[in-house]
Amino acid sequence: MQSFENVLFAARAGAEWAWQRIYEELAPPVAGYLRAHGAADAEDLTAEVFLQVVRGLDGFSGPEAAFRGWVFTIAHRRLVDELRRRSRRPETLVDEPDVTLVGGDVEEEAQAGLDDARVRAAIAALPDDQRAVLLLRIIGDLTIEQIAEAVGKRPGAVKALQRRALKRMEKAYPFPALQR
């Protein structure tokens, strides 16, 4: 397995395998972060994020954790841009029919669907800044300092937002896993 420094060096030199490794490792959590934030087309926005990563790679320096933080900072800024653009030009969405394959344990699938809906509702109910902090922490696996840099806040403010988000979720949607 290649070290991060070697992968970064190879990516800067244009090695396809290095870009593939970077993309395969970071694209799923970036897309998940964007999707959880309500991005209209998370896959397209993820592609835009990685296009920006390609353009800015020569200007990046630092270890792997800093690289991850840098990528999520780009993702957060692209998301903010998209949300601003959408607020100026609201779209009318057409719901696509939900096609679900039949099979498996119906009760288990129904419970999983309810749990998923409750988690999505809990996240959607959070104020934007709390949602951003929580999703960058959980999906992005970023440190408080990296989140602070991504959202342009102080680490203390990020900790407070995270604490308020978790309390708000626990109060409004009492999940058994969150009970102490």
Image (spheres, grey):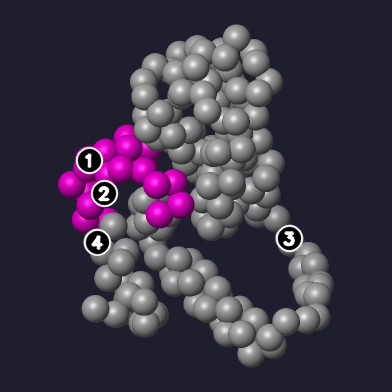
Q: CA distance from mark 4 to mark 3?
A: 35 Å
Q: Amino acid at mark 1?
A: Arg
Lower sequence index among marks 4 and 2? 2
Q: From the viewer's perspective, is residue 35 above or below residue 117?
A: above
Q: CA distance from mark 3 to mark 2?
A: 34 Å
In the rendered structure, the answer to whether residue 99 lies left or right of residue 36 reads: right
Estimate how packed mark 4 is, as few (under 14), some (14 to 19) or many (20 or more) residues with alpha carbons within 10 Å: some
Estimate how packed mark 2 is, as few (under 14), some (14 to 19) or many (20 or more) residues with alpha carbons within 10 Å: many
Residue beneath disc 2: 158
Estimate how packed mark 1 is, as few (under 14), some (14 to 19) or many (20 or more) residues with alpha carbons within 10 Å: few
Q: CA distance from mark 4 to mark 1?
A: 14 Å
Residue beneath disc 4: 163
Q: Secondary structure at mark 4?
A: helix
Residue at horizontal 51 percent and vertical 13 percent from the top:
9
Mark carried by residue 177: none
Q: Is 44 included in the stretch rendered in magenta?
A: no
Do the CB atoms of the residues marked 2 and 1 lie less than 8 Å apart?
A: yes
Q: Give, as a single range, the part of the protein colored magenta.
A: 138-161
Mark carried by residue 92: 3
What secondary structure predominates along the stretch shown in magenta?
helix
In the rendered structure, the answer to whether residue 104 lies left or right of residue 115 reads: right
Lower sequence index among marks 4 and 1? 1
Front-lying residue, 81 or 158: 158
Q: Secondary structure at mark 3?
A: loop
Residue 48: where, in percent of width, then height? 63, 33
Residue beneath disc 1: 154
- Mark 4 or 3: in front is 4
Q: Quadrant of residue 61?
A: top left
Residue 176: where, in percent of width, then height? 37, 82
Front-lying residue, 7 or 130: 7
Residue 116: where, in percent of width, then height? 55, 73
